[in-house]
Amino acid sequence: MSFFVVKNKWLRFLLWQILALLIVAILGLFVYLYYLDIEVREKFEGARWEVPSRVYARPLSLYEGQKLTQAELEFELKLLRYSTASSRLKTNRLNINAGGKPGTYLRQSDALYLHTRPFQFSTGFVDEAYIKVNFKNGYVTGLYDLQNKAELDIFELEPYLIGGIYPRIQEDRILVRIDNVPKILVDTLLAVEDRHFFTHSGVAPLSILRALVANIKAGARVQGGSTLTQQLVKNFFLSNEKTVTRKINEALMSLLLEWHYSKNEILEAYLNEIYLGQNGKRAIHGFGLASQFYFDQSLDTLNHGQVALLVGLVKGASYYNPRRYADRAKQRRHVVLTIQRDLDLLPANTYKMFDDSPLGVKKDKPGSISRYPAFLDLVKDQLRQDYSPKDLASAGLRLYTTLDPLIQQNLEKSITKRLPQLERKAKLEKERLQVAGIVTDAGSGSVRAMVGGRDFRGHGFNRALEANRHIGSLIKPAIYLTALSDPARYKLNTILEDSPIKVNQGQGKSWTPENYDHQYHGRVSLISSLANSYNVSTVRLGMGLGLDEVKKTLINLGIKRDLRLYPSMLLGAVNLTPFEVMQMYQTISGQGFQTPIRAISSVTTAEGDVLTKYPIRVEQTLKPESLYLLTKALEEVMTSGTGRSAYDRMPYDFVLAGKSGTTNAYRDSWFAGMSADRVAVVWLGADDNNSINLTGAGGALKIWTDVMASSARRSLDVPVPERIVFAKVSTLLHRKQRVICDNEVLLPFVSGYLPSTSDRLLCDDEYSR
């Protein structure tokens, strides 16, 4: 009987309702499939993965005459995870087998032999090389290309990967292309996970049924029926919840994925997406990164045993974690090796060798999110003006920075050694002291090292960038520079009065500054007042100059924040971060040429195409002759003033310039200064802003000196500006708590402003030598 001639009206009504519901369901299914189809294509064809930006340190340039020890180069090689070559390299001929794989080195007497890795530098691709580096007395004395039998002028070692800028979900991966993946890996993966991958349409009903039967017989889940495509869908599009709805979505999306894309495209996506481990908060995805994470090798160098282990981890990376559960991992590898043997993917005569061999997993995991989080904070800050956070966390950019791991190591080493000593000296409880330190190149403003707290690897409050603290006497060079910028009135031998002064602060309040030693020193020369950091003579000088003029000088030195003008600012009652202080002293080092501090040299795509370069920028904001005079005064700080203890470690003929800083109640200990090639700023304090019982010279100077002793290569030798002339004059000098007057002090002056006869100080019996 036809449906349309059903005479029973109730039955006819019911059938119409069923038909309507069926039509609605079919339409709904089509709409839902359309929605799923859009989702599948948009994600798969767009930015398939959030690939983090990789942040590199500076490449280490090797050249003849370079001050570099074998131990320092070995430190860098170990950071790069180079391993020691297993056998001897010959100098008269190149033995590639003896050299081992790329990323190996051998130390022999006064030489290091390197088999370097290929690397995509920002300036282009450089292939692997065989290099010999000769050393003598802490210097590089020769550099040779063993393969081409030629001397080299310079060679750049690949830069150390210091961290990454990760997406919110903290996933990491190294993308691989299917054409570059070893055949043994693809064959083994398909043999273990989905032997019918190239014949099914995304879902394999027989495999599901077979798995269901096996699980029922075992009384537990012992076998899975998901195809490789379904696994990809689950990882790429869906959550891990075990519901009927998710399984239906998984099947539908798998069919859609197979409909739109080729098997090779799906397989390539799987190779890059599958979860294979965890490194702290960082999730390891894809075989490319897993190969580096477990074996410190590229994918194309893995042997059958290593491939078997990685493929075995697909079943459960946490459960079979080879670093935590070696026995489980070895048993799982055994299963995969057996499959390789049975399918003739592994020669039977080598099966036992791989099965009996150790897992070969590197004991030490590569660093987690970043080894240098304080520096990485600065990198992110400086990138924000050119790149969105999403681009940085997902576009797979390569960021080449200025960090020098050797200088960073020396800064960290000094802090680790000095902080406990200083806490004992100041009678502070353990781990009370906090620290910030920055080291830059004097000429370029490139940041070579940065520490934001005593926990070098910790993420959180970065004191180098965020700690706003009173800077104490570090402000004084700005005051004296203001004076020296008016050579008609002020010269290095100008006499200042260090005698009691009461400063009117308005509203009936007054301020009476005191010196650190609670004494007054009478007549002092300008150069000695700064060298000995006398407070009272400085306040007298600053009030005479005017607070507005001092503020202008601070702006010209690179201080951008709006400063409130009140008399106590002359003694450092000004809040600045160590980074801002560094900018100020960077300009002093640059002799009035302001160079913005930079942490990045360039940004490229993963393929090496340059997106942005960050060149050195220079702007003259102050007269070089006045900066020259100031620098001579800051050199006096080091030889006779508050910085003189630096020469307990430094050669006395190695010229330095610097300034100490101590704030009220000894809450902050500062030192800032420079050599010809380095500028360094160190701050010590407590996070609760209570006293630490340390002066700048008694605290921060210790770490500053360590940094200079280990990283400064060139003694300060400032070029004499054209308008500077020298003359021997009579000058009061306060040295080692003794006042002397010397009629034959050679000092620089601005041409046309030499002291006149009436300006000259005549030494009397009280002060004469």
Image (tube, rainbow, N blue to C red):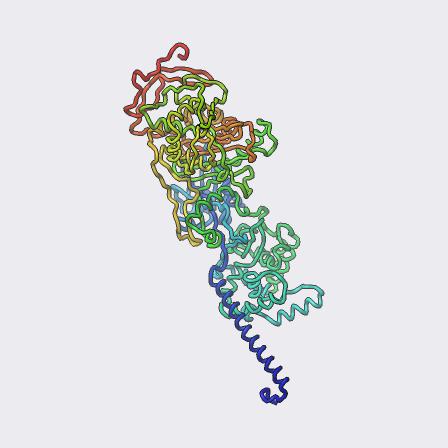
Picture residue at 47% right of the left edge, 23% below the top: 512
Tell which of 441 and 659 is nearer to you: 659
Total marks in image: 0
Q: In this picture, is 537 found above or below 703?
A: above
Picture residue at 48% right of the left edge, 22% below the top: 514
The spot of residue 125 in percent (x, y) is 41, 51
Q: In this picture, is 514 found above or below 229?
A: above
Quick check: 555 left or right of 190? left
Quick check: 359 left or right of 695? right
Residue 347 image-quadrant placement: bottom right
Tell which residue pokes out farthest to the left in this image.
752
Tell which of 429 and 481 is nearer to you: 481
Screen quadrant of the N terminus = bottom right
Quick check: 590 left or right of 571? left
Q: Is residue 590 visible?
A: yes
Q: In this picture, is 107 found above or below 341?
A: above
Q: In this picture, is 61 found above or below 607?
A: above
Screen quadrant of the C terminus = top left
The spot of residue 641 in percent (x, y) is 45, 23
Q: Is residue 589 visible?
A: no
Tell which residue pokes out farthest to the top in this image.
765
The spot of residue 226 in percent (x, y) is 60, 66
The spot of residue 66 in percent (x, y) is 42, 36
